Every structure is written in C-alpha cells, then in structure tokens.
Amino acid sequence: MRNMLFCALALSTATQAHEPYVAPLAYLTENTQVPVLSAYAEQAFHPEYALKDTSFTVFQPNQTQSTVQPVKNLDSAATFDLKLPEKGTYTIFAKTSYPIDYVQHNRQWKIFADVAADKVPALSERDYVIPSDFKGKVPSKVSTVREWSIQSYVSKDSTSPVAVTPAPIQVSFKIHPNQINVQQPVQLQITQAGKALAHAELMVRAQGELEQQAKSTPVDAQGNATLTFEQAGQYLIEVSEKVDAKAKPKNQYYSIISLQVNASKTP
C-alpha cells in the first residue's frame, strides 16, 4: 500500500491533483467531541489516501496545545476524535511534505516523474516530464520539497479567536472563519515570514470540485484579498507563492484551510 501511495502521489503531485486536507464533521457544535478526518484527495473533501505518520496539533480556546495521533484504520483516510472540554474555537493544524524533482525541458523547469511512457498520457496532455521525453540523457535534477500546512477550526457553543499556527504562509480572516455566510465579502490578509505575501496564488474549491474547477482570487501587493461565497457548504482555501517556470525551483509552501460557509447569519 505504501508503494502504491507513493506512486500515486508522484504522478498526482506532478499535476497538483491529490492534495491533503483536514476537516471536522461539524465546524459548529454543542457536543463534547467531534470526529475529524484527514486525507489526500483529488476532489475536494473526497478522501482517497490517508495521511500516514502525521500527528496533529490542537490549539485549545485558552491557547494551550495538545498533540493528537490519528487512528490508522482506513486506507482512504485517517481519523480522530477531537475532544471539546470547553467553549470556544479549537484550531487543528498539521504539516505534511513530499519530495519533488525538477528538470529543465524547453527552457522551462518541470516536475520530473521517473515512470514509463506507457503509464502516462502524451506529453501534450501533461505538465510534467518523464525520461522518454528527452532524446538523450535526462538533465541534472533539482530536488525540492513541497510542504503543505493544513488546518481547520471547530467552535463549541461560541466562537473565540483562532490560534496562530506555525504555517510558513499565514492566512488571517477579518471575520471569524466559522461565522462566514453566503454572499458576504470576506477579507483576508496573507503573510509570509511576517511580511505581506504580494500577489500570492489564492485558489478556492467547493466540496467535490477538482483542481481545474478551482476559483482563482486576486491578491494585491499588500497581501490582501476578498472572497465571496455564492453557496453554503464546505470549501478548501489554498494559498501559495506564484511559481515562475523559468526560475530555478525552490521549496514550495502551501496553506490549505477547510471551511464551512453558512446559509444564514450565525448567532
């Protein structure tokens, strides 16, 4: 199973198809605990491969921290019960990463996947390269790491300020993320290393949507953006630096946040 997962991720990472996320079964609750699910998925919130050997940090409403290790009882997803002993908002956070090699092809840096030609589509149908795409020796590779910071929020009875996580790319909501309603403009501030991340890549996907269906939202030079959700439901917000295909590849950092958009105004 582990080799199958690595193979699937190697190809899907090349096309940025399978990405990790974490999400509770309820974002607003009065319960004393709530199930939380984490996985790699091609369609938003449709789990396919469990996150292996990933522990989660839970920031309590009083800003204390605890570590939770998901139960490894499924191939498609990892799960755990989030205990909710007090009122307020709990922030769930984890990091996961994957090594990626790049090579130059037609003066552009592309992801390199070491697979046979009969296992993948034609070059014109993919944005990564394989050994047979080169007439001679494969050019020197540049090894990088793609790191995802995944997080979500659960509020018991009432909301309280969300915690600041160790994510390299920080996304700050001007309104509490568990109080977002349809047709309501939501302002974001995106920073990296304490500075505004100018013109970041900001993508939004509703539950069930593929990457190709993601909505791109502009981010200004001060790292500001505004989102408006047309329908209630679950959404993934993904933020990263823009990639220049002609520049030498470097480690890439992504922040992926799961949210529930409410149909009407929350109390």
Image (cartoon, rainbow, N blue to C red):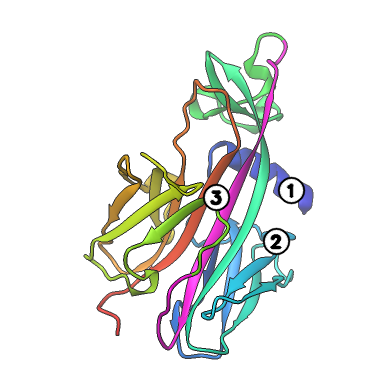
Q: Residue at x 70, y 68 (%)?
A: 74
Tell me how far mark 3 sits from mark 1, CA to CA.
Answer: 29 Å
Q: Is residue 214 visible?
A: yes
Q: Residue at x 64, y 65 (%)?
A: 77
232 versus 113 height, above or below: below
Callout 1 amino acid: Met
Callout 3 amino acid: Pro
Q: Give the mark toward the camera: 3 or 2.
A: 3
Q: Nearer the viewer, residue 94 or 128?
A: 94
Residue 12 x/y as whole percent: 59, 42
Q: Which residue is mark 1?
A: 4
Any mark on residue 168, and which?
3
Residue 146 highlighted magenta (yes or no): yes
Tell me how far mark 3 sits from mark 2, CA to CA.
Answer: 18 Å
Residue 79 x/y as whole percent: 65, 72
Q: In what quadrant of the picture does the N terminus appear? A: bottom right
Which element carries disc 3, helix, strand or loop?
Answer: loop
Tell me how far mark 2 sits from mark 1, CA to CA.
Answer: 18 Å
Which element carries disc 1, helix, strand or loop?
Answer: helix
158 versus 48 height, above or below: below
Which tag, 3 or 2, sits closer to the chain's start? Answer: 2
> How many C-alpha atoms fall within 10 Å of the one at disc 1: few (<14), some, or many (≥20)?
few
Q: Are marks 3 and 1 in contact (CB under 8 Å)?
A: no
Q: Which residues are magenta?
A: 137-162
Any mark on residue 54, and which?
2
In this rendering, position of residue 225 left or right of residue 65? left
Which element carries disc 2, helix, strand or loop?
Answer: loop
Callout 2 amino acid: Thr
Residue 126 x/y as whole percent: 52, 30
> How many C-alpha atoms fall within 10 Å of the one at disc 2: few (<14), some, or many (≥20)?
some
